[in-house]
Amino acid sequence: MNQIQPTARRTQLRVAGASILAAIGVCATLLRPLAAASKNADEQSVPLTGQWAIDPGESRDQVRFTLKASGRGFSMSWSSSGTPVRKLEGLDPEAGSRGSSQVEFRLRREAGSFVCRGVIENGSGGGIFTLELDPSFASELERRGVGRPSLAQQAKLAYADAGFDLLDELKKQGFETPTLETFIRMAQHGVSLGYVRSMGMLGYHFGSIAQLVTARDHGVDPVYVGALRAAGYRDLTFDQLLRARDHGVDLNYVAAMGRAGFHEVPLDDLIRARDHGVDESFVRRVQDGRRDRLSLDEVIRLRDRGY
């Protein structure tokens, strides 16, 4: 699985995979779960079928794997560039290495399994998946006090790859047990097990799940927080992190102001400088030829005067 096909060829393979499945009547089988859910419009809006695609990854034991599904008022696209081949149960790593191969494999998640069928050639291909929901998952969520999900709600959790490990991590860090709606919302907004765990390791537990979701939505992630820590900004409050991110005090700005001579100044001062349009080039221009170094307040005042 080490030859990357041109985009057009990959598209042809995926279309061919879907066509083959339609020809042998698999599509009709895959659509049966939707028919069973026809009594409820909300259930119908979250499909239990969709498309999958696969391409070579950065190493032989990894692939780029994508799932896509859409329904009335619902759209989902999930992709990972480092999916271990071993997680695609039943997939022969050599499938399609000598021409096109029809394949069938599954990707298991706690809420359900994605059963994938299609065609692969030289490491690239695609087809159709059906999502088989695990009935024990709903019972366990209810037992844990989260609530019992409908089929549509459980499908959303499967698509977002949200399960018991995430609930366990939230409990470990002292968060409240989320309601079912909150659990779905946080999962759909990217508050994953990896996100919660990494933020916790950096010392950021925040005060509520709602703050976790807000932080994720605003781009306050472990990479951003870690870089601020490396620049000397530690033990920041939720509000400070959010303000810094929202006001454009990103990693590049912190580094640029450091090069301009303002290392480890208070974060609130950096935010104020950013708001006033002070950047590295302006600092160097106003400082050029001066014997005494200007303070950040002086630089900001010069900027405000249109210097």
Image (cartoon, grey):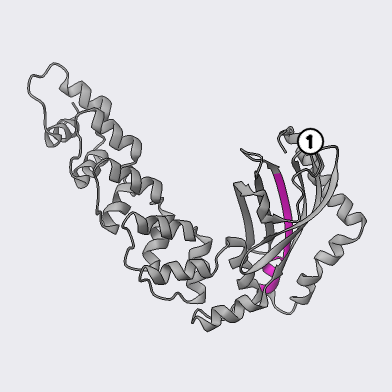
Q: Considering the numbered disc 1 on the image, is that residue within a helix, a strand or a loop?
A: helix
Quadrant of the rendering where the N terminus is positioned = top right
**Residue segment shown in magenta:** 43-54
Quadrant of the rendering where the C terminus is positioned = top left
Q: Residue at x 74, y 45 (%)?
A: 93
Residue 261 location, quadrant = top left
Check disc 1 and report the residue beneath it.
Answer: 9
Q: Position of residue 152 (x, y in %)?
A: 64, 72
Q: Position of residue 168 (x, y in %)?
A: 46, 70
| Image-based side of 228 in relation to 157, left or right | left
Q: Residue at x 20, y 39 (%)?
A: 264
Q: Position of residue 257 (x, y in %)?
A: 25, 33
Q: Position of residue 286 (x, y in %)?
A: 17, 23
Q: Is residue 210 above or below residue 83?
A: below
- Mark 1: amino acid: Arg
- Is disc 1 surrounded by few (<14), some (14 to 19) or many (20+) residues within 10 Å? some
Q: Residue at x 36, y 67 (%)?
A: 173
Q: Residue at x 34, y 35 (%)?
A: 252
Residue 142 location, quadrant = bottom right
| Image-based side of 290 in relation to 278, left or right | left
Q: Is residue 191 visible?
A: no
Q: Nearer the viewer, residue 64 or 30?
A: 64
